[in-house]
Image (cartoon, rainbow, N blue to C red):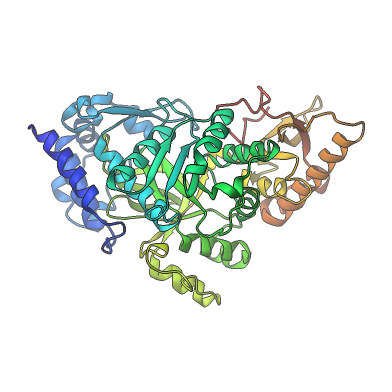
Amino acid sequence: MDDRAQQVLAGLHEFYAAAPGGEDPGDGADGALRLFHEVAATVPAYQAFLRDRGVDPAAVVSAAGFARVPLLTKADYHRRYPLPELCRGGRLDGAETVAVSSGSSGEPTVWPRSVLDELVVARRFEQAMVGSFRADRRRTLVVVCFALGSWVGGMYTAAACRHLAAKGYPITVATPGNNVEEILRVVQELGPLFEQVVLAGYPPFVKNVVDAGRQRGVDWPGYSIRLLLAGEVFSEEWRTLVGARAGMADPLSDSVSLYGTADAGVLGTETPLSVTIRRFLAGRPDAARALFGDPRLPTLVQYDPATRYFETHDGTLLFTGDGGIPLVRYHIADEGGLISHGAMLAFCRTHGFDPTTGLEGAAAPHLPFVWVFGRSLFTVSYFGANIYPENVTVALERAGISDWVTGKFVLQVVSDQDEERRLSIVAELAPGVAAQDGQDRPAARTALLAEAIREELLRLNSEFANYVPAAYQTPQVELRAAGDPDYFPPQVKHRYTRPDS
């Protein structure tokens, strides 16, 4: 048996033998430093990268020295060097497969993967499936609603859940992909054979599935639905709304959001503890601003610093983690921040709230927190104010609006013939809701939604309230049918912003 096979066998044995949770991983700094030296010794691209910047790896001997190591970016590292040189020994054949990014920031990118990389990600899925969904004691059907093929989300989810099934959990995986008809068929045919059904996908698409099922009389509560989500920030109003439509009883444990990227798989996981804290902060914007330094509510997850070591840089996140392309101080460009487990609990308690009440064991892991707003390229600038999709989302989730929209929209700034700039929102109507279903109704809906968006922008975005003249604060709203090919093409990861036009 060669060295690679022995490494894989050892990794598989360690994963299958380990119980979920485990010891306190510490702050992860020592492990990140060890990975730096190992990568500097074995990866040709990283050797060239350090040499070009005058960095002697032997001189980096402490956490303080590690914090001065130059940052990696996709542009100056991944796209600069040939793909094999980004891998250990300059060999691409150390990976069994490749994943492709969705290209949300531009050109799609290839990331080599091995089964050992899958196992690291499977631990995060294990945390969600056991800590939140209790899949160690409930027969569970996982329905993968992410796009399949080379894109990272669907294949990684299927692989990770299959590893959990092989480990002995009563889990079965179905892979209809992002095909609503096939998802509904799978759920109705197989769902009665299980104690719970997990829908795994992007939040707006999963909402589409739930809404389509309700229109067709699917008994969602009868399947004990759970949601495993990734890819986008969503509000607690969204969690409550979709949870109610799917018949979910416990918002703390019935849905889990994963913080994941094509670059390194899953980086962090919502837990009942993190959801408890986030729901508290959603109702206390003063506390949220004090913690996050921003009026927006980010995704809040817990992470294992032993496998993904986070740092911050000018209000954005860096991480160090192993993989087919090992990454050291990789600048992922997500806006966000970090707080230790102890500091988070202390913060909540100073605001009169103890988030651990009623939570035990896997529901409240002793892990640090990372919060993520998303990438600044997903904003638009209007009168100098940065407008975020999160500011608009909550308007579409209002009672009296959420019943006739899907939650998807496109935010952009447009110019008319006189070069007047206007904030434009194109929103997707729910399936079965016609764009023209009465002489006055479309106009009433667009006016209602436009006013709701204006009110939420004034409430949530101080730049908007102070920079944008009152005459320009009400956006232009257009409603388009579900699946509109120009704005909401099916089976494509949705983008909430477009370049100015």
- Regarding residue 229, the answer to whether it shows in the image is no
Residue 250 in view, yes or no: yes
Q: Nearer the viewer, residue 290 or 439?
A: 439
The picture places residue 217, in percent across and down from the top left corner, at 68, 39
Horizontal arrangement in the rendering, residue 5 relative to residue 190 (left or right): left
* Residue 240 percent coordinates (x, y): 63, 55
> Is 250 above or below relative to 49?
below
Direction from residue 335 to residue 398 in the image, left or right: right
Picture residue at 71% right of the left edge, 56% below the top:
459
Which residue appears farthest toward the left when viewing the image?
1
Picture layout, residue 318 above or below residue 252: above
Q: Position of residue 74 (x, y in %)?
A: 37, 34
Q: Residue at x 46, y 71 (%)?
A: 356
From the viewer's side, name the closer residue of 71 and 492. Answer: 492
Residue shown at 60% from the left, 39% from the top? 204
Image vertical order of residue 466 relative to residue 423, above or below: below
